[in-house]
Image (cartoon, rainbow, N blue to C red):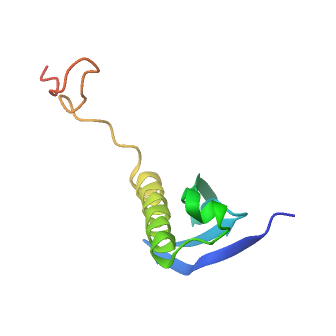
Amino acid sequence: MTPFRVLQKQIDYKGCPIIIRLVGNETFEYITCINGEIYSANIVAKKKLSQRILMKGYTTKQLSDITNYVIAMAQTTIETILNGKKEPQKGSVLSPFSTRANTG
């Protein structure tokens, strides 16, 4: 059985609960409920080489940064589901061969 640890107490964003947890040693996951459906996503955040060699845990700053990133992922998911998918505006898509936006 893979151990997990809840990193963030439940927070609400636009009426949707978000829970952040660490699954195993490197997988950070959020779980949220939007309109009665459960959504989840995860990232793998590797420790620095020196931390892995010395078998040390994440620093407080690393955990804070990773948690903030995962919360932003959850908030983006909630925004997308509640507001519907947004189509890119004409001219806002970059050509793979140019660094300037297409204008027509």
Residue furthest out toward the right: 1
Residue 38 to residue 3: above or below: above
Nearer to me, 98 or 81: 98
Q: Please report the residue visible at 59 percent of the width from the left and 76 percent of the height from the top.
A: 7
Residue visible at 61% across and 57% down in the picture = 39
Q: Position of residue 43 (x, y in %)?
A: 57, 54
Number of marks in the rendered image: 0
Residue 7 position (above or below residue 77): below
- Residue 8 lies, in percent from the top left, at 56, 78
Q: Position of residue 2 (x, y in %)?
A: 81, 63
Residue farthest toward the bottom in the current orientation of the protein: 9
Establish if 12 lies above or below 101. below
| Relative depth, front residue between 78 and 28 | 28
57 left or right, relative to 74: right
Q: Quadrant of residue 31?
A: bottom right
Q: Nearer the viewer, residue 26 or 8?
A: 26
Residue in the picture at 51% in, 72% down: 63
Residue 28, percent from left and from top: 60, 62
Side of 13 where 31 appears, left or right: right
- Horizontally, residue 32 falls left or right of residue 66, namely right
In this rendering, does residue 18 appear at all? yes
- Quadrant of the snapshot with the C terminus: top left
The reply to whether residue 15 is in sight is: no
Q: Residue 29's image quarter?
A: bottom right
Which image quarter is the N terminus in? bottom right
User: Which residue corresponds to the image point at 73% horizontal and 70% vertical from the top-left?
Assistant: 4
